[in-house]
Amino acid sequence: MLRKILFVLLILISMSAVFTGAAMITHPAGGILTLNPGLLTNSFFPDFFFPGILILMFVAVRSLFAVFFISVNKKNQYRRAVWAGLLLTAWFIAQFLFIGSLHWTQAFLFAGAILATLISFQLNGKKLL
């Protein structure tokens, strides 16, 4: 049962990351996502283009790899899911530190990332490596 919950969580997280990353890359001013460019005032980024690339490269790809490994029941499948969850959790913490607030959708995905990490950790035999 935990495996199925993890699988669904990772699919939702990865699809959200693919959509968000692609939207940020194609509309770096934040228009399609109704993002205020002022959110980036305390960050290193002039617009949302580079954060979109980071979301696609790290969050989406890592989560999709974890989904793939879980779906084909590969060795180290849960270890990959642990690291995908930890990476997403770190992303949201960094985002909160730079922006100072979270939208409800970000809070929802942050909770999903923590839940995915904890489930993965449990399924991996409570080992990170």
Image: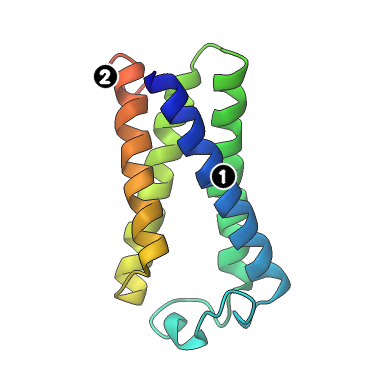
Left or right, residue 53 beside residue 35: right
Task: Name the image quarter holding residue 104.
Answer: bottom left
Left or right, residue 62 beside residue 4: right
Q: Residue at x 40, y 52 (%)?
A: 109
Please tell me whether residue 53 is drawn above or below residue 38 in the rendered image.
Answer: above
Asked whether residue 90 is in view, the answer is no
Disc 1 marks a residue whose amino acid type is Ser
Q: Residue at x 50, y 19 (%)?
A: 77
Please tell me whether residue 117 is drawn above or below residue 38 in the rendered image.
Answer: above
> Which residue matches tag 1?
14
Considering every residue shown, the one lying at the far right of the view is: 26
Residue 124 horizontal/vertical position (percent): 36, 17
Disc 2 marks a residue whose amino acid type is Lys
| Residue 126, disc | 2
Q: Residue at x 36, y 49 (%)?
A: 89
Q: Quadrant of the C terminus?
A: top left
Closer to the chain start, of discs 1 and 2, is 1
Asked whether residue 18 is in view, the answer is yes
Structure colour scheme: rainbow
Instruction: Find numbered disc 1 in the image and state the secondary structure of the residue it sits on.
Output: helix
Closer to viewer: mark 1 or mark 2? 1
Q: Give the number of marks.
A: 2
Residue 71 horizontal/vertical position (percent): 60, 20
Left or right, residue 16 beside residue 78: right
Residue 90 horizontal/vertical position (percent): 36, 51
Instruction: Find numbered disc 2 in the image and state the secondary structure of the residue it sits on.
Output: loop
Task: Name the image quarter holding residue 42.
Answer: bottom left
Considering every residue shown, the one lying at the far left of the view is: 126
Q: Mark 1 and mark 2 in contact? Answer it, CB < 8 Å.
A: no
